[in-house]
Amino acid sequence: MSQRTAYFCGQWIEERELGIPVGDLGFAMGVTITERLRTFAGSVFRKAEHLSRMRHSLEIVGMDSESIIGQIDQAIDEYIERHQPMFTPGDDWAIITFATPGSGSGPTVAVHGMPLAFAEWASEFRTGVTSYLSRHRQVPPDCWPPQLKCRSRMHYYLADTEARAQNPAARAVLLDQEGFVGEGSTANLVTYHQASGLATPRSSKVLPGVSVAVIAELAQELGVPFEERDITVEELRAADEVWFTSTSICMLPVVSLDAQPIGPGRPGQKYDQFLAAWNSHVGLDIAQQAEQFADRS
């Protein structure tokens, strides 16, 4: 097989043909429900959790969640089967699925994927991430609930544009409407204070992260206190460590905020401990894999 394929509205097509018409509400109004999954050793990681979150998002916008999730669940399995011969040993892929209300003839449902873009973050396992606090805030919950994972992400785009004006490699941190720490533009955020343990913003106020749930499980295994609570900007700046966590990256250390170091200004010992625990959980060295495949042609 030389070409990747994609699932699109009940059919398998060549990926290069994948697209939606301009009249589709996913394009015209941004009504696109989405999930991004990844594989470990060729197997999809936490598929049930991702699909559960997607089901809830579909229910929020009033789409037929039962039918759509059934299609996507089967399509993800078939996608892996179809593309298994293209998997390079040791490499892993991103699997993206989305659904829109369509343009009048039924919903648009798709599954596609590609090898993970390790080059975008491989070095940050060692160097850490530079971040800037954005003046752009999370969408108010009375516009749409934080639990809705969708592609209406202008606030994320503006926040990252603002951060990259300070440093081209920087990522944004957004506050919620009350002024508490919210999330990164593409990741949940976790703080570590030696005196109190790990904390992350309340899941009722940010997108409930599949990966931050992994951090919570690892914390229980390692005997490290973990809680959801409101986090002030002052607490964020004073943290001993801060991490971004999301599906593709798993977890990355945030080493500075607004050009000031967080803790020692380098990846910390607690980060190393949790990344090692995640490695054991999935049976591979996550940072080493990213570095190995960062230079793929």
Image (spheres, grey):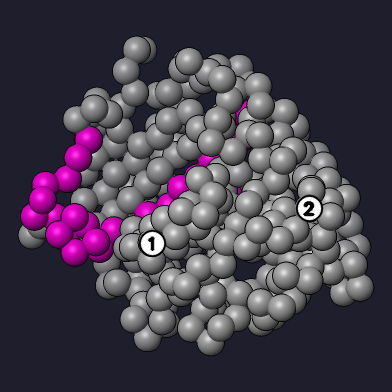
Out of 161 and 271, give the one closest to the viewer: 161
Q: How far from the left and from the top, in percent, is residue 56?
A: 42, 68
Question: N-terminal of the two: label 1 or label 2?
Answer: 1
Residue 263 falls left or right of residue 223: left
Q: Is residue 160 magenta?
A: no
- Checking the image for residue 33, the label placed there is none
Out of 165 and 133, give the one closest to the viewer: 165
Taking the image as drawn, is residue 149 in sight?
Answer: yes
SS label for mark 1? helix
Q: How far from the left and from the top, in percent, is residue 78?
A: 40, 32
Disc 2 crowd, CA 10 A, few/some/many (<14, 14-19, 20+)? some
96 shown above or below 290: below
Residue 210 falls left or right of residue 78: right
- Residue at figure coordinates x 48%, y 52% from the top left: 164
Q: What range of the chain is rendered magenta?
A: 18-46
Taking the image as drawn, is residue 66 in sight?
Answer: no
Q: Is residue 43 magenta?
A: yes
Residue that badge 2 annotates: 265
- Residue at figure coordinates x 53%, y 18% from the top left: 296
Q: How far from the left and from the top, in percent, is residue 102?
A: 16, 56
* Amino acid type for the residue under numbered disc 1: Leu
Residue that badge 1 annotates: 158
* Amino acid type for the residue under numbered disc 2: Gly
Out of 202 and 66, give the one closest to the viewer: 202
- Residue at figure coordinates x 43%, y 30% from the top left: 114
| Image quarter of the N terminus | top left
Name the residue at the top extreme: 2
| Location of residue 241 (image quadrant) | bottom right
Residue 37 falls left or right of residue 155: right
111 shown above or below 194: above
SS label for mark 2? loop
Labels 1 & 2 near each other (Cβ < 8 A): no
